[in-house]
């Protein structure tokens, strides 16, 4: 299935609306033709060509090449129009013609309005559905995908590429339907009036089509490059704004300005190339059409001077012929817009086609509760084709046990605990919870049993209340307050301008690091998970904040199975068991006093380094 055909699959919910839009386009085209054709009897009535009250002269014999049925239909329509409109008094005929012309224009614009509104509904609906599909799919992708993909690039595909697809849909279902219908109507009028002049006009068409095809190929290539450039620009912008504190701290404003300018200039040059190529089609088409128009006026003028064609018919032909130019110009850009949409669609479907490797198995089972233990059996792991991070980890964590994972930086501690909620799957061995392989447990069921608090606290630009109750709908305020109290957060929340309804800013920038950490703990307490994972939850805090957070952590861990990673070994001295990891392997296991007693043990060495004073 081609990229463009796949885009069409998103239009299925809007088939009825699209059909109504096409019907409106048909009526718009018909009344457009009627409004132009009525110029001929108007000119005849005003300037003669027959005696007062008589119908206009029949068309020239040049139309005799038309099929007999078409000639008969035309004659019947002319006769009906003659009896309905023309009167003995030319003033009455003029009034009738003016009323019909005004009515034709009224209906023409009414159907144009309806068609545009219906088409906008389809276009914007498709844009919404594509964005929603992308957003949902992004949430299904594993963490490994985001380590290799820039955030700005993903944002660009949602915010920049999808609207480009929208322009292609507009080109296909509006321009490609309405403009050919207009061409057909106006071309029919031209053929009825003079087939010879019409043939001369369309000699230029093959040349125009060749130009359009060549331009379209260039536009497709350059449009894909333009979308990549805007993605690069979005990435730089996102990274700079997210890290603005670091930029200012290191005085790197000018460096970031230069980097942004480079990306901005690159996009500028690319978009100029795309625009220049796209804009080449319209003036080229217009020039070729004007050249054909000059020939038509010369040849048609000779026919009028030679009395083989009425002047009113020739002027009517010119009106109809020049009405062909706007649709032709629009159609000359359709291929470019479709090529741009196809290039953008390719980038969008690259994301949608990325299959999540962390997902529910076909025979996945729900985990009703956590009742026994979590076991690592010969677990190994590496990121992609990189070096092994974990090597043959075998570990059993019993329900209610507090297990601390310690070791030097880069030993694999965070990777080990990331395997528990299945952010990643082991590349070797397996992990079981209550005897069931994690890969056979439904993801939502598994993660419902796990609460996670990390060093990098993720909060949202929302109220304190909604951040604590994240993931819980219509949670009573009393329960939120109780969780905040348990996390030592209620006091500072109460001092905020709007209390629990205070907005804390993006990533919680309006509150301190310790306060952010306590809100994260309150969120975990409110979730009340049977398994708790703490990853460096106090490492970046000052002494006072650490004491408050540590008290909240102790309350949170009470009665729960807890896995704790901490560089500050003072925070894990009371763990039921301490597991020491080095180079992806477990090298020591035991309680604090046991490990300190080992003369050459790694834990003793780490402890002495921290407390050497």
Image (spheres, grey):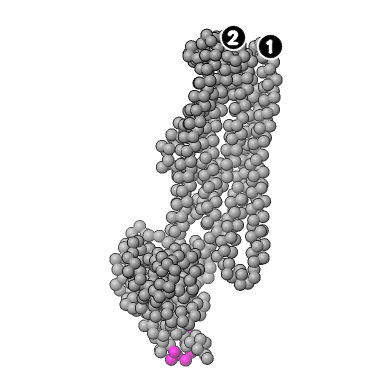
Q: Residue at x 52, y 76 (%)?
A: 410
Residue corresponding to mark 1 = 306
Give the Cα separation between the discs numbered 1 and 2: 18 Å
Is residue 441 at all visible to an observer of this figure? no
Dominant SS in magenta: loop
Residue 402, label in figure? none
Residue in front for this viewpoint, 553 or 161: 553
Seen from the viewer's position, the closer of residues 58 and 183 is 58
Span of residues in magenta: 596-602
Disc 2: CA contacts within 10 A as few (<14), some (14-19) or many (>=20): few
Q: Quadrant of residue 191?
A: top right
The image quarter in which residue 492 lies:
bottom left
**Image height check: is 304 above or below 601?**
above
> Along the polypeptide, which appears first: circle 1 or circle 2?
2
Looking at the image, residue 323 sits to the left or right of residue 141; the answer is right
Left or right of 353: which side holds 481?
left
- What residue does disc 2 label? 50
Q: Residue at x 68, y 32 (%)?
A: 287
Whether 181 is drawn above or below 265: the answer is above
Q: Please check the rendered image and state whether residue 481 is part of the magenta-colored stretch, yes or no.
A: no
Query: Residue 485's spot in the image, x, y percent?
Result: 36, 75
* Residue 292 on image: x %, y %: 67, 26
Q: How many marks?
A: 2
Q: Which residue sits at x=33%, y=64%?
A: 475
Question: Which mark's residue is nearer the viewer, 1 or 2?
Answer: 2
Secondary element under disc 1, as helix, strand or loop, is loop
Q: In the picture provided, is 319 more to the left or to the right than 355?
A: right
Circle 2: element type: loop
- Quick check: marks 1 and 2 in contact, CB under 8 Å? no
């Amino acid at each position: 299935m081609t990229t463009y055909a796949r885009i069409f699959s998103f239009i299925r919910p809007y088939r009825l609306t699209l059909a109504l839009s096409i019907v409106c386009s048909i009526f718009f085209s018909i009344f457009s033709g009627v409004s132009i054709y009525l110029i001929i009897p108007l000119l005849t009535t005003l300037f003669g060509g027959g005696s007062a009250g008589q119908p206009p002269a029949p068309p020239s014999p040049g139309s005799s090449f038309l099929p007999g049925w078409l000639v008969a239909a035309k004659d019947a329509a002319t006769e009906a129009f003659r009896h309905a409109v023309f009167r003995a008094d030319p003033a009455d005929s003029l009034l009738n013609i003016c009323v019909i012309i005004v009515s034709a224009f009224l209906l023409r614009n009414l159907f144009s309005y309806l068609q545009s509104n219906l088409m906008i509904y389809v276009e914007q609906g498709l844009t919404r559905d594509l964005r929603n599909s992308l957003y949902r799919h992004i949430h299904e992708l594993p963490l490994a995908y985001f380590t290799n993909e820039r955030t700005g690039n993903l944002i660009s595909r949602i915010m920049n590429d999808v609207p480009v697809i929208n322009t292609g849909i507009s080109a296909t279902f509006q321009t490609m339907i309405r403009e050919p219908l207009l061409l057909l109507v106006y071309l029919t009028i031209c053929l009825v009036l003079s087939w010879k002049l019409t043939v001369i006009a369309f000699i230029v068409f093959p040349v125009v089509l060749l130009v359009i095809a060549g331009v379209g190929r260039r536009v497709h290539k350059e449009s894909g490059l333009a979308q990549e450039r805007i993605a690069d620009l979005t990435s730089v912008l996102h990274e700079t704004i997210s890290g603005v504190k670091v930029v200012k701290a290191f005085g790197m404003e000018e460096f970031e300005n230069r980097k942004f300018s480079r990306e901005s200039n690159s996009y500028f040059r690319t978009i100029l190339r795309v625009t220049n190529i796209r804009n080449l089609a319209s003036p080229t088409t217009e020039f070729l059409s004007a050249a054909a128009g000059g020939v038509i006026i010369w040849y048609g003028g000779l026919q009028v001077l030679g009395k083989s064609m009425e002047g009113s018919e020739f002027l009517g032909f010119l009106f109809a012929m020049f009405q062909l130019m706007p649709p032709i110009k629009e159609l000359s850009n359709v291929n470019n817009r479709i090529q741009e949409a196809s290039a953008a669609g390719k980038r969008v479907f690259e994301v949608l086609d990325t299959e999540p490797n962390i997902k529910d198995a076909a025979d996945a089972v729900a985990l009703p509760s956590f009742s026994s233990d979590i076991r690592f059996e010969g677990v190994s792991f590496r990121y992609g084709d990189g070096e092994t991070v974990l090597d043959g980890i075998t570990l059993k964590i019993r329900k209610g046990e507090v297990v601390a994972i310690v070791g030097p930086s880069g030993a694999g501690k965070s990777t080990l605990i990331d395997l528990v909620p299945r952010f990643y799957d082991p590349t070797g061995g397996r992990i079981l919870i209550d005897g069931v392989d994690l890969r056979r447990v439904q993801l939502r069921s598994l993660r419902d049993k796990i609460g996670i608090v990390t060093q990098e606290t993720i909060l949202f630009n929302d109220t304190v209340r909604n951040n604590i109750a994240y993931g819980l709908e219509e949670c009573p305020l009393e329960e939120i307050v109780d969780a905040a109290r348990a996390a030592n957060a209620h006091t500072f929340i109460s001092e905020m301008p709007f209390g629990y309804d205070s907005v804390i800013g993006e990533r919680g920038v309006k509150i301190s690091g310790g306060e952010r950490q306590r809100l994260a703990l309150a969120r975990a307490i409110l979730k009340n998970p049977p398994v708790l994972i703490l990853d460096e939850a106090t490492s970046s805090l000052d002494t006072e904040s650490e004491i408050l957070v540590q008290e909240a952590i102790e309350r949170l861990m009470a009665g729960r199975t807890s896995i704790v990673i901490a560089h500050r070994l003072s925070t894990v001295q009371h763990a039921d068991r301490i597991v020491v990891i080095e180079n992806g392997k477990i090298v020591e296991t035991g309680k604090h006093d046991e490990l300190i007693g080992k003369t050459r043990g790694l834990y003793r060495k780490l402890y002495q380094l921290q407390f050497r004073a």
